[in-house]
Image (tube, grey):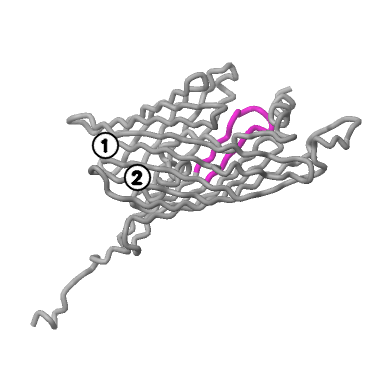
Amino acid sequence: MKKWLLIVVLVIGVFANADAQFDAHFTHYWEMQSFYNPAAAGSTKKMNIYASYSNQLTGFENNPKSMLLNVDTPIPFVKGDHNLGVGVINDEIGLFTNQHLYLNYAFGLKLFNGRMVAGAQLGLVNSSFDNSKIILGGDSNDPAFPSGKADGNTFDIGAGLLYQHKHFHVGISGLHLNAPLILLGERNEIQIDPFFNFMAGGNIPIKNTLISVQPSLQVMTDFVSWRTDITARGTYKYEEKNFFGGITYSPSTSVTVFLGAEMLNITLSYGYEIFTSGIGMKNGNHDIFLGYKMNLDMFNKEKNKHNSIRILQ
């Protein structure tokens, strides 16, 4: 029953000029700003490499699964605040497989003791549908479903703004702004609606302790559906190690708990999302985040600078 319930939900409404919310939601959104906003590329001033895996609606057959890999970095050998990023995400949703390959560029300027950044994104989206697992009964030639496997792809664009201050950050972005249309075979198509994201966060140190609190907020919408995530994250710093944990509340959707650590520039965290809509605790989302930040000192022109002994004589 669970198998067919999920298949029906995922298939009905997709074909015959259907609209689809294309982008995945990840528990560790605050660590993945450059995925949601191209202006966040290079925002850490380090080479930032991260991957995330989300196994959603655990326990259902053909449940959604998402995997993301992203690399973004400042360009140290170019004068000015120039940054690049590249990433790829693979979504498996029932009988659909969606991929999004994107390239981000961000340019920043100093403003009000902070940094204002504008970003642009150019991407390629691909969607495929495998009809081999559907039993259509006597009418196996129903034109509403492609025969065998059908796929298609198209280009898309995005843009964003980000303001960073030492105490807080706030950003807004729009992805798939050209509303890409993907043709699946000769009869079917998927329209990807523009997708907008607002994100803000801060850092609040607790006086005379090694603990700090990082509240954050994310609002995602295509103006048909909305999702809000309100996160309270606490960090304990011991020597060069950071241990953190917290909770995210998404009104009318879920509660998420997460726990992680950062050491030697490596961040590893696990989160579990529990839906409040009656699906049950055991059918929640598992989310794993792994990141690595690399210093770019190798490009520092002042490194190993010295005077010639011959000149000093």
Find disc 2 in the rendering and name its residue: 263
Kindly identify the residue that appears in the image at 78 percent across and 39 percent down: 131
Residue 141 falls inside the magenta stretch: no
Q: Nearer the viewer, residue 54 or 240?
A: 54
Query: Residue 2 sits in which quadrant?
Result: top right
Q: Give the range drawn in magenta.
A: 52-68
Question: In the figure, 95 relative to 206: above or below?
Answer: below
User: Where residue 20 sits in the image (x, y, percent)?
Assistant: 63, 34
Find disc 1 in the rendering and name its residue: 167
User: Where residue 251 sits in the image (x, y, percent)?
Assistant: 47, 20
Q: How crowded is mark 1: few (under 14 residues within 10 Å), some or many (20 or more)?
A: few
Query: Residue 34 sits in which quadrant?
Result: top left
Pick out the residue farthest to the front: 178
Residue 56 falls inside the magenta stretch: yes
Kindly identify the residue that appears in the image at 37 percent across and 56 percent down: 82
Kindly identify the residue that appears in the image at 66 percent across and 28 percent down: 60
